[in-house]
Amino acid sequence: MFYHIQSLINPIVEDEPDPSAANALQEGLGGQFGEMRTMMQFLFQSFNFRGDGIPYLDLIQGIGVEEISHVELITKTISRLLDGSPRYQGKKFDTPGKGGEAPLEVGKEAQNPHHFIVGAQGALPVDAAGNPWSGSYVHNHGNLVLDLMDNLVLEATGRTQKCRIYQMSSNKTLRATVSFLIARDEAHQMAFAKALETLGIDWAKALPIPKFDATKYPEVKKLMDAGIHREAYHFRLDSSLMENIFSGSAPTNDGTELVTLKEPKTSYPIPMAPERPEEFAPGLDPEMQKLADALSEFKQKTVKEMTKKAGPDSSKLK
């Protein structure tokens, strides 16, 4: 089973809305080498894992759990890049379109109008061309070595594509998220390379690890200077054997050391998505809003009264 904390693994940096950048980032979410695939591939490999190689299971599953947070981060980023792009200034209960204006006209010109027609200025499970994400992207061979090799190629390819997406836009919202994913993809590359190394791969003789210098991107350099590209997280409330693999010198032989942690050192608040009258979202009319407000007021009043009556034992009230 899994637990969730209402925090992001990386902060959303504020900038202007940019539907074009949002659509490019869709490839990093729902593309063949995007975050939805890495999440599902690693989780399915861990759920279907055979044998008693528990350190390898813990490694694959820990990265799979982290990928859930990457899907969360990238969807929030896409939504942020879309949200408010029509520049609609109407009030909550206004009737959009009254008077002949077209409040969603920007959606007609967008590279993916589904962001405005289907998604209400939010992320979709599709790639940059609008193709739906497919479970056929997921590779789970049942052979540990083959799975690890496949995962290494997946992370290396995803990292390459994110570097290309970075160069498509100067939008700070997009670049902050993509830079974080570039750094973390390198960490995952190292994880699967190190796992293969423990199984007998001699990188100096067999084949090179795909690599390139991402420090030319200032946002990525800052993250790499902080060392997050050499960290792995197991996200376990009990115990994990991930450190049996993810430790020691990095397979790139660059003098860096791999470090396993329970979780990232820092988390960040999730930005609230404002209501969007032009999208009829969330759709509460004035009467329904009054009912919702009354219920909220009743709950607050009830908790306050119960807390007062409970006295010193009020901490037990939940």
Image: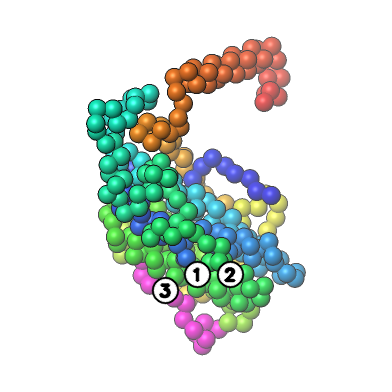
Q: CA distance from mark 1 to mark 2?
A: 10 Å
Q: Amino acid at mark 1?
A: Leu
Q: Residue furthest right?
A: 52
Give percent across and percent down for residue 158. 44, 66
Q: Secondary structure at mark 3?
A: loop
Q: Specify the principal SS of the magenta part.
A: loop
Q: Quadrant of residue 52?
A: bottom right
Q: Residue at x 27, y 49 (%)?
A: 109
Q: Amino acid at mark 3?
A: Lys
Q: Residue furthest front?
A: 100
Q: CA distance from mark 1 to mark 3?
A: 13 Å
Residue 173 appearing in the image: no
The residue where tag 2 is placed is 139
Give percent across and percent down for residue 29. 45, 57
**171 left or right of 231 in image:** left
Dot 1 or dot 2: first in sequence order is 2
**Magenta residues, as a range?**
202-214
Between label 3 and label 2, give the one nearer the viewer. Answer: 2
Dot 3 or dot 2: first in sequence order is 2
Question: Which of 262/36 is in front?
Answer: 36
Q: Amino acid at mark 2?
A: His
Q: Secondary structure at mark 1?
A: helix
Q: Are marks 1 and 2 in contact (CB under 8 Å)?
A: yes
Looking at the image, is 193 positioned above or below residue 69?
below
**183 left or right of 147 in image:** left
Question: Which of 116/11 is in front?
Answer: 116
The residue where tag 3 is placed is 211
Q: Residues within 10 Å of mark 1 (few under 14, many from 20)?
A: many
The residue where tag 1 is placed is 154
Q: CA distance from mark 3 to mark 2?
A: 23 Å
Looking at the image, is 9 positioned above or below residue 137?
above
